[in-house]
Amino acid sequence: MNKEELLKLYNSDLEQLLEKASKYIKNEVEFCSLINARSGKCSQDCKYCAQSAHYRTDIEEYPLISKKEVIKAAEEAKTNGVIRFAVVTSGKSPDEENFDKILGFIDELNKIEGIRSCASIGILNEEQAKELSNHGLKRFHHNINTSESYYKDICTTHTWKDRLNTCKLVKKYGMELCCGVILGMGETIEQRIEMAIELSEIEPESIPINILMPIPKTPFENYNNKIDEENILRTLAIFKIANPKSIIRFCGGRMKLSDKNQELALKTCVEGILTGNYLTTTGKSPQEDINTLKKLNKNLRKV
């Protein structure tokens, strides 16, 4: 569908829109989880981010954690039904020393039966993408965050095309791609449609949907009401319709939706959940998510 068709659909009756999206989902939900393996002091000026060194937020900052801590967290996540576990680090790109350690993390994660290794470590060059693939990384996470037309209003220290290039390298070297967005940063409805179309061209296996949780002392600290629940649901549905083969995944900020609307989304367009806490914000516990799936008669996806 082109932009005009998707925009018309976006503005159609909500119930009918969700019903249309529901034709593309399965009756199972996939859990993933992450560990914030290095926090803060990022050189980039993304206006939403608590970890940017450009803003004086109150988050905890620390260097790369140990391999032991990563594996312990992955083993615990596995007991909660998680099948994908991500190592996430702050910063534009990994430096050589940390990159070598991260490769070691991936080697160990790949030894855990039932866990598929994931990483989100910033913008990659070709050699790094090749090395990650050689070490058996299953999936790389790298969001476009917003539409290309709006990106300059979100970040000035790198470009939307820098992010796109990393996505292309991930696919070039045979890894799966997790690539999504952050809603509620002041984008227009048309730009949400643009995101859906851009993602359909990138073809990620997973599309994580984050909803902005305004962080004090960032430029977006007062952006609490940039998107309401109905428009979140409409966007989720459009993303699923435009990307029928991709898993639409609840990520950070889903607490902006009521429990009722989270359940409605899981019935109609969402097939994945980043469960537990996120990088600098909190979510639901895995047991709460498991209870929701039982209530909805949804199956928890296994490896």
Image (cartoon, grey):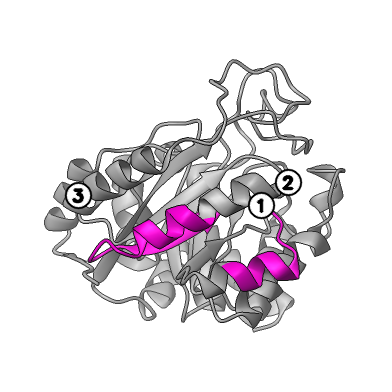
Q: Residues within 10 Å of mark 2 (few under 14, many from 20)?
A: some
- What type is the residue that disc 1 sits on? Gly
Residue type at the position of mark 2 = Lys
* Of the pair 74 and 236, the residue shown nearer to us: 74
Give SS at disc 3.
Answer: loop
**In percent of the image, x 58 and y 39: which residue is there?**
212
* Amino acid residing under circle 3: Asn
Figure quadrant of residue 285: top left
Relative to residue 123, is residue 286 drawn left or right?
A: left
Residues rendered magenta in the picture: 103-131
Mark earlier in primary sequence (3, 1): 3
Classify 10 Å Cα crowding around label 1: few (below 14), some (14-19), many (20 and above): some
Upstream in the sequence, badge 1 or badge 2?
A: 2
Residue 239 position (above or below residue 141): below
Indicate whether residue 163 is drawn in magenta: no
Circle 2 SS class: loop
Q: Earlier in the sequence, mark 2 or mark 3?
A: 3
Q: What is the spatial separation of the Cα atoms under label 3 and label 1, in whole angstroms?
A: 27 Å
State the residue at coordinates (41%, 61%). 107
- Quote the CA–CA distance across marks 2 and 3: 31 Å
**Disc 3 versus disc 1: nearer the observer:** 1
Image quarter in which the N terminus is found: bottom right
Q: Nearer the viewer, mark 2 or mark 3?
A: 2
| Residue 298 to residue 254: above or below | below
Q: Residue at x 73, y 70 (%)?
A: 126
Mark 1–mark 2 contact, CB under 8 Å?
A: yes
Query: Residue 287, image x and y in percent?
Result: 17, 43
Residue beneath disc 3: 80
> Which residue position holds label 2?
92
